[in-house]
Image (tube, grey):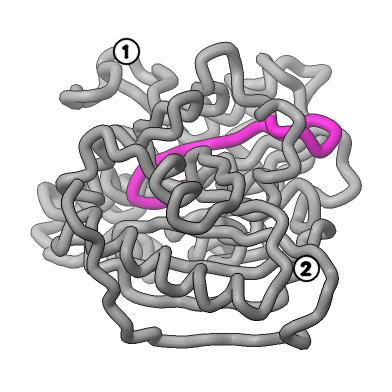
Amino acid sequence: MGKLSYPGSVESIKITGEVADMEKYLLGIDLGGTNLRIAVVTSEGQLMEEINIKTESDKGPNYIIGQMIQHCEKILQDRNIEAIGIGSPGPLDVKQGLILSPNNLPGWDNIPIVSMLEKALNKKVYLDNDANAAALAEAIIGAGEGKESVFYITVSTGVGGGFVFRKQLLQGAHFCAGEIGNLIVDCEGPSHHALNVGALETLASGTAVKQRGREQLRITGHAGEVIEMAMNGNEEAGNIVDQMIVSLAKGIANIVHTVDPHIIVLGGGVMQSKDYIMPLLLERVNDFLYPQLQHKVEIVDASLGTKAGVIGAALLTQQASF
């Protein structure tokens, strides 16, 4: 790995609790391609202190891990931290504590992030994918609070998910439970180098909507531009968004028929347009469900926003399945 660098500039620090007390806290790290968030969280999920900086992913893992260590060391001086959890883009080897080769983190090939942080910070460190971390937060203190079984779906650059039952994250035998982006919803759909033909992510993600917008509408913007055009009555944009909604509805129906959760929580960047998307989605989901399941499963939008990942990362430390 080479020598770690220790950069400094913190874009924002938010402190909501008193420092230097004796209560034990959890530390969460949300590693993203754009932002790196580090937060102090209580065992109940209350956010006490947050640091938000740019990831600067083009500078590689040494630089970014240096940031993590530097800011975690500062926090450890003032807080009694029990353990540290990391939510990261996949693919991961959770059992070995490795980040393998995420698309939005170039150069992160087989990075032993758990052992590196444990050695530097002398704390137990837990790793899982970012969708699972967000699922945990939304299930325990977010939109799924009080529900026995919660399935969380993020519709953003990709499509991911996580299933929480009785406040425990279900990871699966190979730590791949909830990887719904590869569900086949159209066997004649688009191909992808790393996914099944017609996979949910190739049809319902923000990337998919953006790509079709560029091909059919000749726009250069993001998925939100296509959705906005649909909202303003553009028929072709409306067809693109409808295809996304139908594909997402099929994916949700597959989940409902498989695990029958009490509630499904939808988050991610695409769902920022929830006022337009949600009513259409709720209508279409029922088209693909058994009659006895129609209108039975609650489907709601996420409530924690960008905080879900970092809060959930901290709560990973309390999971009995690790």
Q: Residue at x 45, y 48 (%)?
A: 119
Position above or below: 233 against 74: above
Viewer-nearest residue: 5 or 284: 5
Per the image, the residue denoted by label 2 is: 46
Per the image, the residue denoted by label 1 is: 187
Q: Quadrant of the C terminus?
A: top right
Q: Position of residue 31 (x, y in %)?
A: 41, 56
Give the class, few, some or many, for how many residues have Cα within 10 Å of label 1's Cα (few <14, many ≥20): few
| Quadrant position of residue 113 | top left
Viewer-nearest residue: 311 or 66: 66
- The earlier-in-sequence mark between 1 and 2 is 2
Residue stretch in magenta: 155-169
Q: Residue at x 19, y 66 (%)?
A: 221
Q: Secondary structure at mark 2?
A: loop
Amino acid type, mark 2: Gln
Position above or below: 35 against 128: below
Q: Is residue 91 left or right of residue 60?
A: right
Q: Residue at x 55, y 53 (%)?
A: 122
Q: Is residue 217 left or right of residue 223?
A: left
